[in-house]
Image (cartoon, rainbow, N blue to C red):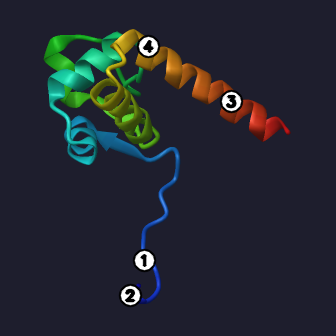
C-alpha cells in the first residue's frame, strides 16, 4: 500500500442545500428515480409541493445524498422494493437517534 499523502476533502454542513441535478449526479440516478423517492416519502424536497412542473426547482438537504444512495443500493443489490427500502431507512434513522442518546 502506498501513502498518497494527507486526505483532502470539504466539510459540508447538514443544512447545505443541493439542486435536483446535483442530487442526481451525486447518486448516479435519473430524475424520475428521485421523483419516485419523493412520492414514497423516502426524501423530501426542502421547498416544495409535489407538482410536476416545479420538480426542477426542488432543493434537498445534503443528507438526502446518503438516503438516496442507501435506497438505491438496497433496491439494486438486495432486491428490496421501494417500500422496504423506505422502512429500512426509517429504522436506520431510529437506530442512529438511539445511539446519539446513549
Q: Which residue is mark 3?
A: 95
Which of pointers 2 and 1 indicates the residue nearer the eye? 2
**Mark 1 closeness class: few <14, some 14–19, many ≥20 residues within 10 Å:** few
Q: Is mark 2 in CB contact (under 8 Å) with mark 1?
A: no
Compare marks 1 and 4 and give the one earlier in the sequence. Answer: 1
Compare marks 2 and 3 and give the one earlier in the sequence. Answer: 2
Left-right relation of 73 to 24: right
Tell me the SS state at disc 3.
helix
Q: Is mark 3 in CB contact (under 8 Å) with mark 4?
A: no
Q: Position of residue 46 (x, y in %)?
A: 41, 28
Tell me the SS state at disc 4.
helix
Q: Position of residue 48 (x, y in %)?
A: 34, 19
The residues tagged by marks 2 and 3 sit, at their Cα atoms, a distance apart of: 35 Å
Left-right relation of 14 to 37: right
**Quadrant in the picture for residue 92:** top right
**Quadrant in the picture for residue 76:** top left
Q: Position of residue 47 (x, y in %)?
A: 37, 25
Left-right relation of 66 to 21: right
Q: Can residue 51 be seen at all in this image of the molecule?
A: yes
Q: Position of residue 72 (x, y in %)?
A: 31, 30
Which of pointers 1 and 3 indicates the residue nearer the eye? 3
Q: Which residue is mark 1?
A: 8
What's the mark number on residue 4?
Answer: 2
Amino acid at each position: 500500500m502506498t501513502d498518497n499523502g494527507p486526505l483532502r476533502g470539504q466539510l459540508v454542513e447538514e443544512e447545505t442545500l443541493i439542486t435536483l441535478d446535483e442530487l442526481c449526479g451525486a447518486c448516479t440516478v435519473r430524475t424520475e428515480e428521485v421523483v419516485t423517492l419523493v412520492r414514497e416519502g423516502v426524501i423530501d424536497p426542502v421547498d416544495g409541493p409535489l407538482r410536476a412542473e416545479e420538480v426542477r426547482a426542488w432543493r434537498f438537504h445534503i443528507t438526502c445524498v446518503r438516503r438516496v444512495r442507501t435506497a438505491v443500493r438496497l433496491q439494486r443489490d438486495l432486491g428490496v422494493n421501494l417500500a422496504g427500502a423506505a422502512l429500512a431507512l426509517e429504522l436506520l434513522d431510529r437506530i442512529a437517534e438511539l445511539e446519539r442518546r446513549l
